[in-house]
Image (tube, rainbow, N blue to C red):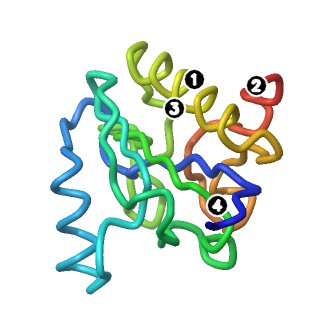
Amino acid sequence: MRKIDKIIVHCSATPEGKDVKTETIKDWHVNGNHWKDIGYHYVIELDGSIHKGRDESVIGSHCKGQNANSIGICYVGGCDAHRRLPNGQLSPKDTRTKAQKQSLIELLKKLKAKYPNATIHGHNEFAAKACPSFDAKNEYKDL
């Protein structure tokens, strides 16, 4: 059994309102990146539905240097649909729907009950990225 000491929140870096499905993200990871499976353990779609990715017992592929002892959660969204950065990429934006916010809190509470010593982080704490486009560590510090 893996020792889980971190729960890491991600975004899919897709435009606000774009209804990307878990299967699409899995396709990006498997066929695009040539990984064995989707990198995340859970994906939260726009409607708030929580979809299982990799089994929790399997090391994820979501945060370099942190995968062995973490659970990865991704919400669909994270980018402004219209604003672009100077490099042409979509601008980061907290695009979580009300349903996604509620589901993310429920999932984090469930995982914290299962892994009480795990701390909650945003991917941006471990990589030079905006992901998840909000301050997850601060927002969930009391869970």
Mark 4 to mark 1 CA distance (whole Å): 17 Å
Residue with the mark numbered 2: 143
Secondary structure state at the residue bearing disc 4: strand
Q: Residues within 10 Å of mark 4 (few under 14, many from 20)?
A: many
Secondary structure state at the residue bearing disc 1: helix
Q: Is 55 in front, or is 132?
A: 55
Instruction: Indicate whether 70 appears above or below 30.
Output: above
Q: Residues within 10 Å of mark 2 (few under 14, many from 20)?
A: few
Instruction: Indicate whether 14 appears above or below 93.
Output: below
Q: Which mark is residue 94?
A: 3
Secondary structure state at the residue bearing disc 3: loop
Residue shown at the point (58%, 46%) measured from the top left: 9
Mark 4 to mark 3 CA distance (whole Å): 23 Å
Q: Which mark is residue 70?
A: 4
Q: Please report contact status of discs 1 and 2: CB closer than 8 Å, yes or no.
A: yes
Residue 89 in the image, given as x and y percentages of width and height: 39, 60
Mark 3 to mark 2 CA distance (whole Å): 20 Å
Identify the amino acid type marked 4: Ser
Residue with the mark numbered 1: 105
Residue shown at the point (72%, 47%) measured from the top left: 121
Q: Point out the residue furthest to the bottom here.
A: 34
**Side of 28 where 140 appears, left or right:** right
Secondary structure state at the residue bearing disc 2: loop
Q: Earlier in the sequence, mark 4 or mark 3?
A: 4
Q: Nearer the viewer, mark 4 or mark 3?
A: 4
**Side of 131 where 128 appears, left or right:** right
Mark 1 to mark 2 CA distance (whole Å): 8 Å
Q: Residues within 10 Å of mark 3 (few under 14, many from 20)?
A: some
Q: Point out the residue furthest to the front here.
A: 1
Q: Earlier in the sequence, mark 4 or mark 1?
A: 4
Residue 107 in the image, given as x and y percentages of width and height: 52, 30
Q: Is 59 in front, or is 105?
A: 59
